[in-house]
Image (cartoon, grey):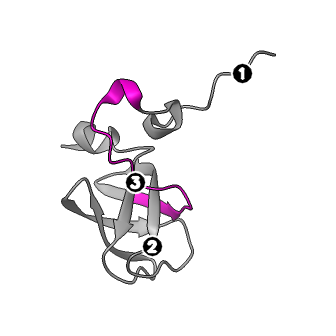
Amino acid sequence: QRKQRETLVGRIGTATTKMLPSGEVDIDGEMFDAVTSGMAVEPGQSVEVIDVRANRIVVKPTSREISTDSDPLQRSLEDFGFDSIQDA
């Protein structure tokens, strides 16, 4: 189950409860217990999964929107938790 949760890193979800710092988030229609990385999050606010510690998902507030595109080939690298590729 931990490996399954680790695939959530980089994903965008929505807080369904007030997070001070723990609460619930909805990621692709599935509810998860989560904690914030230290700041309060209001219900309905978008959050990004930044880590999985033990069985706890760690999130931070984000301005990124949830992708409604189900085709993974159409999603950006950032949606998968990777930094964008830039020529040096």
Label 1 vs label 3: CA separation? Answer: 24 Å
**Left or right for 30, reference 23:** left
Give the residue pinned by disc 1: 86
x and y percent of residue 47 in the render?
A: 45, 62
SS for tag 3? loop
SS for tag 2? loop
Give the residue pinned by disc 2: 45
The foreground one among 2 and 46 is 46
Question: Within the image, what quadrant is residue 9 found in?
Answer: top left
Task: Residue at 52% x, 80% y: name it.
Answer: 40
Q: Residues within 10 Å of mark 1 (few under 14, many from 20)?
A: few
x and y percent of residue 84 in the render?
A: 62, 29
Query: Quadrant of the image for the N terminus?
Result: top left
Nearest to the eye among marks 2 and 3: give it. 3
Label 1 vs label 2: CA separation? Answer: 30 Å
Which label belongs to residue 66?
3
Q: Magenta part of the protein: which range? A: 58-74
**Pointer 2 and pointer 3: residues touching (CB < 8 Å)?**
no
Q: Residues within 10 Å of mark 3 (few under 14, many from 20)?
A: some
Query: Quadrant of the image for the C terminus?
Result: top right
Tell me if residue 37 comes above or below residue 3 in the rendering: below
Q: Residues within 10 Å of mark 2 (few under 14, many from 20)?
A: some
Instruction: Say which amino acid is labelled 2.
Output: Gln
SS for tag 1? loop
